[in-house]
Image: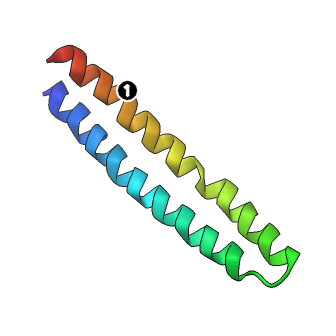
Amino acid sequence: MLYKIVLFLHVSGALLLFAAITIEWFFIMNIRKAGSLENIKGSLTLYSFFSKIGQISMILILFPGIYMMVEV
């Protein structure tokens, strides 16, 4: 039963990684289109908040992956 929960967390981490990559791509496109420095600062402030999604996804991929590797 624990293995299934860990597998779910691992797959959820992979989905969050794709979400983080999409968010990063969105912010890069906004920075490219920005006309002034204030627009860039606003985008970077939001990006610093959403960048935590990438960190969480990496943790959710790494630790459950290590557990599954040791278990099998």
The location of residue 59, given as percent across then percent down, is 45, 34
Image height of 69 relative to 13, above or below:
above
Extreme residue toward the front, this view:
32
Residue at 33 percent across and 53 percent down: it is: 15
Question: SS of the residue at dot 1?
Answer: helix
Image height of 38 relative to 68, above or below:
below
Residue that mark 1 sits on:
63
The location of residue 26, given as percent across then percent down, is 56, 71
Question: Residue 72 sits in which quadrant?
Answer: top left
Q: Nearer the viewer, residue 35 or 66?
A: 35
Residue type, label 1: Phe
Please tell me how crowded label 1 is: few (under 14), some (14-19), or many (20+) other residues with Cα within 10 Å: some
The location of residue 5, given as percent across then percent down, is 22, 34
Q: Is residue 20 left or right of residue 47?
A: left
Residue at 69 percent across and 76 percent down: it is: 32
Residue at 45 percent across and 39 percent down: it is: 58
Q: How is the image coloured?
A: rainbow
Residue at 60 percent across and 52 percent down: it is: 51
Image height of 47 relative to 12, above or below:
below
Question: Residue 67 sits in which quadrant?
Answer: top left
Quarter of the image for the N terminus: give it. top left
Q: Is residue 69 left or right of residue 15?
A: left
Q: Nearer the viewer, residue 31 or 42?
A: 31
Q: Is residue 23 left or right of residue 7?
A: right
